[in-house]
Amino acid sequence: MNKPISVSSLNAQIKSLLETTFIKVYVEGEISNLTYHNSGHIYFSVKDNGSTISCVMFRGNAKYLKFQLEVGQKVVITGNITVYAPRGNYQLLCSKIEPSGQGALALAFEQLKNKLEQKGYFNPEIKKQLPKYPKKIALVTSATGAAIEDMKKVAHHRWPLVEFILVPALVQGEGSAYDISQSIKYADSLNCDIMIVGRGGGSIEDLWSFNEEIVANAIYEARTPIISAVGHEVDYLISDFVADVRAATPSNAIEIALPDINEHRIYLDSLANEYISKTKRVVEIKQQNLTNLKRLFEQNSLDSKFNFIESQIKLLKSSFQADISQKIVVANNELNFLKTSFSNKIEQRHSQMQNQVIMLKNSYEQNDPKRKDKKGFVQITKNNKVISLEDLQKSDKISLQTPTYIASCTIDEIQKQ
């Protein structure tokens, strides 16, 4: 079972989800419940036939409004969703409000964006990678604008080794879109490492040249990696979507394009420290190895070897003498043992032989042929072997022998008395 969460945690999650999902939205509707607060903030709602949403425009943005808001007025709002977590309310935080009649530019932007997206201009797979250490960068921007000076200043502090080539272009007004596209094509022929296309901030009308299809086509067809750096961070142009990289401002484009020399200095310092540390460690190891080798050499020198051999000879001599004495004692003991054992064996063998002679003598006397000639006694043999009467069985074929006669017989019946 899932553990329940608090209301505050739920509202915090909703706030995070909404504010990260609806970062920038365009909303068209009719104003209602309008309040101009003494603080300079404007509170109102915007509605259509089916829904209403609360809106707020803070004083910092409200001061740029060129017209007075009125109830019932139809407007186009640019903003983002914000959530007031303590009450669980969400509202539209307005950064720009335009009359609905002037919303044609926004519509044209969305139409061109959808068209180019379907043609694959925004496909991440075709985006070109920026080189890590560019040597030459082409700047397509106004030669008299503040953006070029900002970029030069950032580059001087960040990576002064880079070379800039300025390709002047009209960045607003009639014919500017065509001029920008031609400048992009020319800059692409200069074999630069990176091209930055952009200008400083301004109104949507001032920036509109970068929303033209002719500029999008020039960026898409360029072989040089392009950074789009138009306006401020809140401004999103068609050039931002088509370019390989989008920068919030021209200065940010330089930060993206160039490495930070200070980071590399720190990295080089760390490498130097690491090199010194490792070198010191290697020297210490070599010194230790040298000390060990010196000690080993002393242990294996001729004097050491002679002294060792001399001590071994003395030890062996002493050990040999002791070993010889011990072996003589052992040999004498073994000799005495062998003498005793041999005498015992001789006596035992002599006794055995005497017994065997007596047995043979008795056997001979019992088998003396002369004894076979005694009246009434015969020798019984079966298969040429002497056999006792007790071992005979019915039907056995036997021979009855005396010194002068042999009788062949068959046993018909055996009875025990």
Image (cartoon, grey):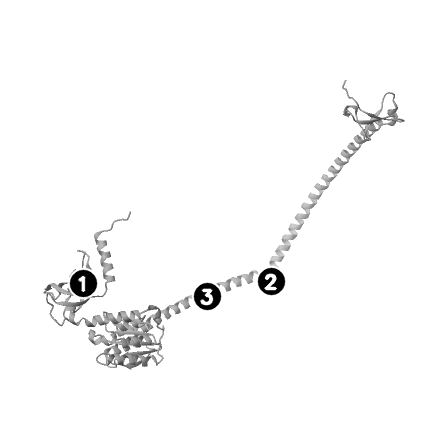
**In the structure shown, which secondary structural element does the residue marked by tag 3 occupy?**
helix
7 or 267: nearer the viewer: 7
Name the N-terminal-most of marks 2 and 1: 1
Q: Nearer the viewer, residue 259 or 21?
A: 21
The image quadrant of residue 242 is bottom left
Q: Is residue 10 above or below residue 278?
A: above
Please name the residue that numbered disc 1 is placed on: 92
Q: Which mark is residue 304?
A: none
Q: Residues within 10 Å of mark 3 (few under 14, many from 20)?
A: few
Q: Nearer the viewer, mark 2 or mark 1?
A: 1
Q: Which residue is mark 2?
A: 302
Mark 3 and mark 2 residues within 8 Å of each other at the beta carbon: no
Q: Is residue 261 left or right of residue 202?
A: right
Q: Residue, x 19% and y 72% (percent of image)?
A: 104
* Kind of residue indicated by mark 1: Leu
Badge 2 element: helix
Alpha-carbon span between mark 3 and mark 2: 31 Å
Q: Label 1 neighbourhood size at 10 Å, few (<14), some (14-19), many (20+)?
A: many
Quote the CA–CA distance across marks 2 and 1.
Answer: 95 Å
* Lower position in the chain sequence, tag 1 or tag 3: 1
Mark 2 belongs to which amino acid? Leu
Q: Can see residue 325?
A: yes
Residue 200: horizontal and vertical position, in percent? Answer: 23, 76
Q: Which residue is mark 3?
A: 282
Number of marks drawn = 3
Image location (x, y in percent) of residue 146? 23, 78
Judged from the image, the secondary structure of the residue bearing numbered disc 1 is strand
